[in-house]
Amino acid sequence: MKKLLIPLGVIIGFFIILAMIFAPKYNQFVSLEEEVNQQESQIETQLQRRGDLIPNLVSTVQGYASQEQEIFTDIAEARSQLAGAQGVEEMAEANGEVTSALSRLLAISENYPDLQASEQFTGLRDELAGAENRIAVARQDYNTAVQEYNQNTRTFPGNVIAGLFNFDEKAYFEADASSREVPEVEFNTEQDGE
């Protein structure tokens, strides 16, 4: 009987030591994953805040530049795509489309001095700039959280825990390749009545 208790005690001791090593690492993964989820939620919140400004900005610009219908359609489509985005990668791609369309809208608005002088437009443009800054900060915070999480999934003993409990690497919030291109804007140089 004593001979059986010693190996059993060693096995139980081994499992206790393993639990003491792996339990904190597992809990760290749970915390890191929650941080990534919280930061993703912050990005969504800031994108929604910017999205809520867009209809007012478009309405203001339409009052001065109603002939620029194509850009208004592009903005509506990009905003719709962002609203339906599932996951970080789709959100990043849709965000690039919205940013590109808004950049073209703001570039077009420079062709309308009365619009530029409008207090409503100026206020909306400033709010939009603030929203863009908050999105950039949220994106940076998210990517920092993802970096820490991914480092833990790839280093030992984290990679063992990650593999056992399906803690997969997370995607970074990256700018869409098309958002790096400068949009082409053509200004109609003909004035009405000339």
Image (cartoon, rainbow, N blue to C red):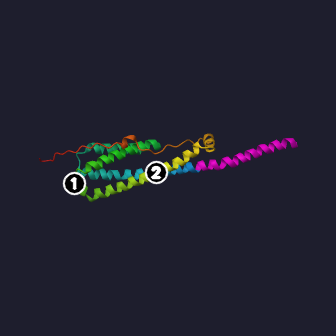
| The disc label shown at residue 7, or none | none
User: For the magenta stretch, what is the residue range?
Assistant: 1-30
Query: Which one is in front in this view, the residue at disc 2 or the one at disc 1?
Result: 2
Q: Which residue is mark 1?
A: 113
Residue 6, how many percent across, how many down? 83, 44
Q: Amino acid at mark 2?
A: Gln
The answer to whether 148 appears left or right of 112 in the picture is: right
The crowd level at tag 2 (other Cα within 10 Å; few <14, some 14-19, many 20+) is some
**Residue at the right extreme of this rendering:** 1
- Residue 127: tell me if it is visible: yes
Picture quadrant of residue 76: top left
**Amino acid under label 1?**
Pro
Q: Which residue is mark 2?
A: 140
Tell me which residue sits at (22%, 54%) in the image: 113
Q: Is residue 84 visible?
A: no
Secondary element at tag 2: helix
Q: Which quarter shows the N terminus?
A: top right
Q: CA distance from mark 2 to mark 1?
A: 35 Å
Residue 91's quadrant in the figure?
A: top left
Q: Find residue 9 and report its horizontal and vertical position in percent.
A: 80, 45
Tell which of 140 and 91 is nearer to you. 140
Q: Main secondary structure of the magenta part?
A: helix
Relative to the observer, which residue lies in front, 112 or 145? 145
Residue 29 within the magenta-colored segment of the rendering: yes
Check if residue 19 falls in the magenta segment: yes
Percent across and percent down for residue 59 are: 28, 51
Label 1: state its secondary structure.
helix
